[in-house]
C-alpha cells in the first residue's frame, strides 16, 4: 500500500508531464525534487499499473474522419457486456462507456462523412444483436477534449476537487 507522500510524489510527476510531456527525466526530476532514477522507476511503475499513459492524439478531422458522433445505446437485458465488446472492436468507434440512465452504453465514433456515419448506424450498429434502441448525436464543435482536463488541474493546482480526497477503487493508498 502506497503512502500518501508517495502518491503525492507520483502526482507531482504526472502534473509536470501534463505541462510538458516531452521533457527529459533529468529536467522532470529537477522540478519534482527526486533523482532521475527515481522518476524513471516511478514512471515505469505508473505505466505498468495503468495510472499513466503516453499517447499521440491527432485531430480526427486531419486524419480524414471529421464527422464526430455520439451513440446512445439501450441494450437488451443481459446483452450489455457483449455489445460493449463488439463496439470496442469496431475501428470507427474510439470510446465505449458503460453508463447509468436511460441508455446503457455510450459510444463515440469518428467517420469520413455523414453518409458513412449513417451507414454505420443503420447497417452495422442497428443490426447488432441486443440493441433495443439507439440514438445518434453529431458533434458540431468540440470545446474541450477529455485529455485536456489534466492540463487544467496541473495549471490551477485545484487538486482537492480534481483528484478527490476520498478512496479511489483500485488505487492502493487512497483509503480513508
Image: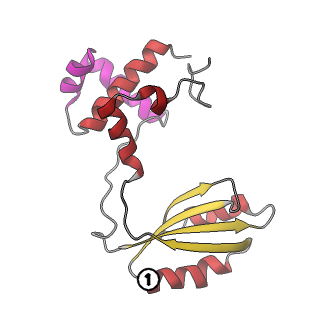
Which x, y percent locates residue 19? 26, 36
Q: Is residue 134 above or below residue 56?
A: below
Where are the magenta residues, as a range? 24-48
Where's the N terminus, which quadrant? top right
Asked whether 86 falls inside the magenta stretch, the response is no
Residue placed furthest toward the right: 77
**Looking at the picture, how far across and down is residue 126, in whole percent?**
65, 79
Instruction: Reply yes or no: does residue 34 show up in magenta.
Output: yes
**Above or below, 148 relative to 171:** below
Q: Main secondary structure of the magenta part?
A: helix
Seen at 65% across and 54% down, the residue is 99
Task: Tell me the residue that label 1 is attached to.
Answer: 114
Nearer to the camera, 36 or 104: 104
Tell me if 161 is positioned left or right of 74 in this view.
left
Residue sitting at 59 percent across and 80 percent down?
124
Question: Going 68% across and 53% down the picture, which residue do you hit?
Answer: 100
Amino acid at each position: 500500500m502506497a503512502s500518501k507522500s508517495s502518491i503525492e510524489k507520483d502526482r507531482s510527476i504526472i502534473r509536470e508531464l501534463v505541462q510538458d510531456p516531452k521533457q527529459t527525466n533529468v529536467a522532470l526530476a529537477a522540478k519534482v525534487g527526486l533523482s532521475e532514477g527515481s522518476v524513471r522507476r516511478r514512471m515505469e511503475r505508473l505505466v505498468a499499473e495503468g495510472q499513466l499513459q503516453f499517447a499521440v492524439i491527432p485531430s480526427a478531422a486531419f486524419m480524414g474522419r471529421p464527422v464526430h458522433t455520439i451513440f446512445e445505446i439501450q441494450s437488451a437485458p443481459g446483452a450489455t457486456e457483449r455489445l460493449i465488446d463488439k463496439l470496442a472492436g469496431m475501428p470507427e468507434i474510439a470510446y465505449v462507456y458503460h453508463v447509468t440512465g436511460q441508455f446503457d452504453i455510450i459510444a463515440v465514433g469518428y467517420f469520413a462523412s455523414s453518409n458513412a456515419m449513417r451507414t454505420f448506424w443503420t447497417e452495422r450498429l442497428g443490426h447488432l444483436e441486443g440493441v433495443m434502441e439507439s440514438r445518434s448525436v453529431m458533434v458540431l464543435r468540440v470545446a474541450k477534449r477529455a485529455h485536456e482536463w489534466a492540463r487544467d488541474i496541473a495549471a490551477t493546482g485545484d487538486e482537492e476537487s480534481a483528484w478527490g480526497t476520498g478512496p479511489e477503487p483500485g488505487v492502493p493508498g487512497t483509503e480513508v
